[in-house]
Amino acid sequence: MALAKESTPVSARNGADQEAEYRAQTRVWLRLLACTTLIEGELRRRFRDEFDFTMPRFDVLAQLDREPSGLVLGELPKRLMVSAGNLTPIVDRLVADGYITRTPSNLDRRVQIVCMTVEGRKTFRRMAKSHGAWLAELLADFPADRFDGLIGELDELKGAVRDALQKP
Amino acid sequence: MALAKESTPVSARNGADQEAEYRAQTRVWLRLLACTTLIEGELRRRFRDEFDFTMPRFDVLAQLDREPSGLVLGELPKRLMVSAGNLTPIVDRLVADGYITRTPSNLDRRVQIVCMTVEGRKTFRRMAKSHGAWLAELLADFPADRFDGLIGELDELKGAVRDALQKP
DNA sequence: GCCTATTATTTTAAGCCTAAAATATTTCGC
DNA sequence: GCGAAATATTTTAGGCTTAAAATAATAGGC
């Protein structure tokens, strides 16, 4: 089993092995979920308390910060891995608050371009700095020399899941 | 730096090191979030399509499945790491659907005991089986011999974050 | 040039989630 | 026993999320 990796068909294994792998997979998933929930909850709380802001709003600004000339609105749901309908009210409010602009394209009137304002960029940078510090605080007790290893594992996990989703 | 771990105070490091660690921490967080979002989204989709069910509802049943004699209602928010108010409508619906019962305690009329019904237990077991198979499918391409290592890292990460949250 | 399919976006319906306020009950100091 | 603090739960207000339907505009076949 130790060398079998994913190439061994499930049907070729005995029951005990399969059971053990099921348990390991479930444990990975539960740990992953617990870590994410824990960190996400704390970040959300701080965004709210410190800046009266939400993470989804911050995520939109983070995408636009990297695009000085703005972004086609339809690009946001893809990059943020959320549904398009979801973004409509979030973008609405960011526009109303003056952090971003939304202008229809002249070439294709279905398309809109969203772009950060000067005010938005300033606010974002201030929040991003705190965001980094919060993360540093939350992860301070994890050995720094093992970050890279963990990043590698998570990258591989992400790739494996993506591949599995691609297949059908 | 390689041996410094978390014991080196941030103030004692040079700027480049600190920058590098910030980036590593951010990468860990983004990978963690991406993996969780990816898996969670797919599981949610399948619960919906296959069973017309949601993950929060499944999570409640999963807790009750381990407690043959039921659980004090107030225990659920703690175990599931969600707010109490959140559970009220979820439990309401599970009761309405006949999967669980909710009975006031005779000793303390503030307290309620929730308990899975026979029907609920049957439904849960059927869904849990699929849940395990879905997870196995999604994680099939990740080397089986590295699950334990990843579980260990995630456990440590979770512990580190918990400790950091404890401090103030 | 018209009609259909496609694409971009918004709307709708339903459910999840939190924080904070409200309600109901119990416990405990006195 | 009485009243204040504590505890269990629900309600409320606000925001996020999805899937599916609706709207609007463009592109392409004929």
Image: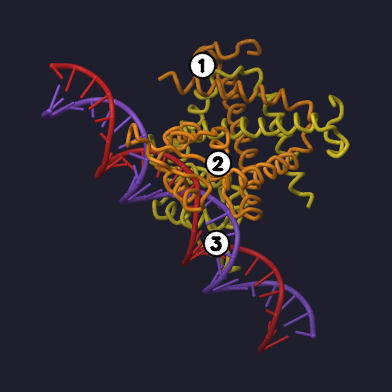
Chain colours: A yellow, B orange, C red, D purple
What is the CA distance from the residue labelled 1 to the residue labelled 3?
44 Å
Q: Chain of mark 1?
A: B
- Circle 2 is placed at which residue position? B61
Which kind of residue does numbered mark 3 sit on?
Answer: Gln
Q: Is residue A69 visible?
A: yes
Q: Residue at x 51, y 16 (%)?
A: B10
Residue A11, image x, y percentages: 86, 39
Mark 3 lies on a secondary structure that is strand
- Circle 3 is placed at which residue position? A112
Tag 3 near tag 2, CB within 8 Å = no
Give the crowd class for mark 2: few <14, some 14-19, many >=20 residues within 10 Å. many
Q: Is residue A48 visible?
A: no
- Circle 1 is placed at which residue position? B10
Q: Based on the displayed image, in which of its 4 quarters is residue C24 positioned?
A: top left
What is the CA distance from the residue labelled 1 to the residue labelled 2?
45 Å
Q: Residue at x 65, y 23 (%)?
A: B153
Q: Is residue A26 above or below residue B3?
A: below
Tag 1 near tag 3, CB within 8 Å = no
Which kind of residue does numbered mark 2 sit on?
Answer: Leu
Task: Say how many tags the image has.
Answer: 3
Give the crowd class for mark 3: few <14, some 14-19, many >=20 residues within 10 Å. some
Q: Based on the displayed image, in which of its 4 quarters is residue B110 positioned?
A: top left
Q: Are marks 1 and 2 on the same chain?
A: yes
Q: Which mark is residue B150?
A: none
Q: Chain of mark 3?
A: A
Q: Chain of mark 2?
A: B
Taking the image as shown, residue A43 lies to the left or right of residue B18, namely left
- In this view, the residue in front, B86 or B143, is B86
Which kind of residue does numbered mark 1 sit on?
Answer: Val
